Amino acid sequence: MRALFQINLFLILLLSCLHANAQYYKTLPKGVRLLNTRYIKSNISSSFNRSKSESPYQYEIQADTQQLESINNQTLNDALEVLQEYPEAYDKFTLGTHKLDANADVNVEVLGFAYGISSQVTAYVGIPIYQAHVKLNYSRPQDSTQQEVAQILQSEYGDNWAQTVGNILEKIYQIDQAAIQSTLVNHYGYQELGDWNGTGLGDIELGFMYNFKETKTYGLKSTIGFIAPTGYTDDPDLIQDIGFGDGQWDIFFEFGSGIRVADNTYFNIWSRYTYQMETTKELRVPYDEDIFISSEKTTFREKLGNQIELNLNLGHALNDWFTLTPELNFNFTEAATYSSDHHEANDILAMNTESYSQNFKIAANFSSIELFQKNSFLLPAQLNLSYQTMLTGKNTPKVDLLEIDFRLFF
């Protein structure tokens, strides 16, 4: 589902296995292995729109005569045909406003493994496993205009005509969630509305880190890798689901540096560029940029926008085992492109796909590595606790993250 819950989860960007070190450029010593498990918890109930304003995830259906005429329902068609003979009543006629509100709880467990191929090169893999629960709420904030239409018919055409037409309209005034459900399933071909639960694999990331420069005061590191499309993607027949992956191969290159600015304090900066390869997807054919419901599906060539990510943090070690690190993250995604025989739909799908987000993260790192090297602790390990909040964004879900990360070196 694309429009009600346009959540292109960027949790996959958190997979890189070794960024918790105070020095960004550090890699594993030759022959050392790292086993990493990371738990990420988030709740998503709003997004930043194209004007960078935060708004809840919701969709309203204004059931006026224009909308009702487009629904292939015999009872509706018969009633509207009768009502057309009474223009003033016809213009006032509506079945009210029907609203869908959505929010999602998304938990991700990332299993990571890294190996020091040499003192400068480390290979790693990150495997995310998603658990998502989407809650979909139906409400009717505005009732039908039954009384107004009845008064118009009575004053203009008399009690008998009002009663006759009113009896016909009474059959459709009680349209509610069940009727909308029936229309979505029978006419548009969607699966039933309701809460949605999903568990499954996300997109797997594999990369190689190269520490090609290290001195007492600074270091440089580059990373190259790819992200495989192993995750569940949006189902065009489901309105309320969430994709765990984007459905296409990604290739990325990352470069960064760490600089010692004071005793036990390092400033790190790194950037990643991700190229997203084109793929083929079956999607709904949109009729209008503001209406996501469609009865037609077709195959599109989809090229998601390439991504540029910039990270800056300042890691300060308070002692041998505790480091505090505030961090800023900037993420920009270019507009997507679509190609099919439906040229207008191509443009509609590409609208508002260029996105931007700015995030703040604070992390606490507990490490026994130095204590282990001093023979003061049994095992070399790290425990990282962090919280990340989105400060602002454009065309992106508002995602705040709680994270627990454990790393064991052996």
Image (tube, rainbow, N blue to C red):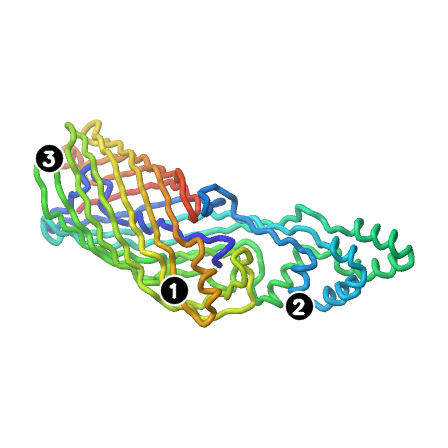
Residue 367 is left or right of residue 340, and the answer is left
Mark 2 burial class by Cα count in 10 Å: few <14, some 14-19, many 20+: few
State which quadrant residue 167 falls in: bottom right
Which callout, 3 or 2, points at the residue further toward the start of the chain?
Answer: 2
Residue 331 is left or right of residue 45, and the answer is left
Three-letter code for the amino acid on which mark 1 is drawn: Glu
**Viewer-side residue, 291 vs 264:** 291
**Looking at the image, do the residues carrying marks 3 and 2 touch, with CB atoms under 8 Å apart?**
no
Disc 3 to disc 2, C-alpha distance: 71 Å
Q: Residue at x 80, y 63 (%)?
A: 85
Which callout, 1 or 3, points at the residue further toward the start of the chain?
Answer: 3
Three-letter code for the amino acid on which mark 2 is drawn: Asn
Q: Secondary structure at mark 2?
A: loop
Q: Position of residue 262 (x, y in %)?
A: 15, 28
Residue on which disc 3 sits: 217
Q: Is residue 140 above or below residue 65?
A: above
Q: Secondary structure at mark 3?
A: loop
Circle on res. 72: 2
Q: Residue at x 45, y 62 (%)?
A: 347
Q: Secondary structure at mark 1?
A: strand
Residue on which disc 1 sits: 302
